Amino acid sequence: MIFRLSAENKTTVKSRNQKLHLIQEDHFLTALDSKSKEKGPLESNSENFCVTLMGPFISTRNKPSIAITILQAAKLLRSINWTVKIIPDDIQSSYNAQVNLRRIDAASAKKKAKIDQEFSYLSMNLDYESMEVKNPAGVSVAYIDTLSNDEDEQWITIKCISRQTAHFIKIQLRNDFLLAKIDHVERNLAFERKDFELTSITDIECEELGTSFLLKQKNTNEIVAKAHCFYQNTDADSPGPTLDLIETKQGWQEQGFGTSLLNAIEEFYREIFANILNFEE
């Protein structure tokens, strides 16, 4: 079982949401040299100091709701005196006003404790903002979000401002969440053809995490093929590496570069998500 592309059209990959996921080996793709429409340059500025953690909630056999998943992460971070801001200021003000109106009834006020307000907010709002995390010194160090509204796959993402923060949070959540670590950096990747070099660049584009892959011929520096992946399949509403684009430059097509590039991408994600893959198996 390895990462592969789920696509009905097995010769041309054009659009997003054709998900790299775990399928049986008899579903392997055989030809991926693509003539898909140009979507612009893939070069981008990597955020060398940022790291994104992502993965599922694993501490219970029952599939939790999004609200429970986020609140558990917040509880673990708050236990070490970090703060997690779940409810935006304007909505929190509205909640507080409602509580103030009921101050004469102590029992009613208690029913609207902070944790109940947060559960209510998360349960009713599918388009909530990323939740800011601050360390005990009051410095913003991370932002929590989710990758899916699917009740069967509850993944959280935590964008951290540094590798040190990511390491600390991953340790703090390790008993309840299985988290992969995605560095926002440029990396040189192994490629099966020695006269070519493959580079990956991971960064945030339009508020969404993505990784670009650029294949070049070494002696000419000519771009031969490229690909781009996001980390959520929005059509299927499920988390995981999702192929947005893969294409081979005209003149280099029908030589297997698309297939070789896809194989390299799968190795890239197999390494990153190894802990999750091993857990699921």
Image: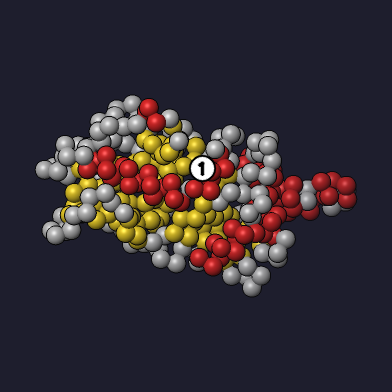
Q: Which residue is found at the position 33% from the left and 26% from the top?
A: 8
Q: Is residue 227 above or below residue 185?
A: above
x%, y% of residue 146?
55, 46
x%, y% of residue 92?
67, 54
Q: Tell me, yes or no, if residue 164 can be seen here.
A: yes
Q: Is residue 184 above or below residue 4?
A: below
x%, y% of residue 5?
37, 35
Q: Which residue is found at the position 42% from the left and 47% from the top?
A: 269
Rendering quarter of residue 56: top right
Instruction: Find numbered disc 1 in the image and state the secondary structure of the residue it sits on.
Output: helix
Q: Which residue is found at the position 83% from the left and 50% from the top?
A: 109
x%, y% of residue 1?
45, 36
Q: Amino acid at mark 1?
A: Leu
User: In this rendering, would 6 be left or right of 175?
Assistant: left
Report crowding for label 1: few under 14, some 14 to 19, many 20 or more residues within 10 A (C-alpha): some
Q: Quadrant of the C terminus?
A: top right
Q: 140 or 259: nearer the eye?
A: 259
Name of the residue lying farthest toward the left: 251
> According to the image, label 1 marks what residue?
277
Q: Which residue is found at the position 28% from the left and 35% from the top?
A: 13
Q: Tell me, yes or no, if residue 54 can be seen here.
A: no
Q: Report the colour scheme.
A: secondary structure
Q: 68 or 256: nearer the eye?
A: 256
Rendering quarter of residue 25: top left
| Count of numbered circles on the image | 1
User: In this rendering, would 105 be left or right of 149?
Assistant: right
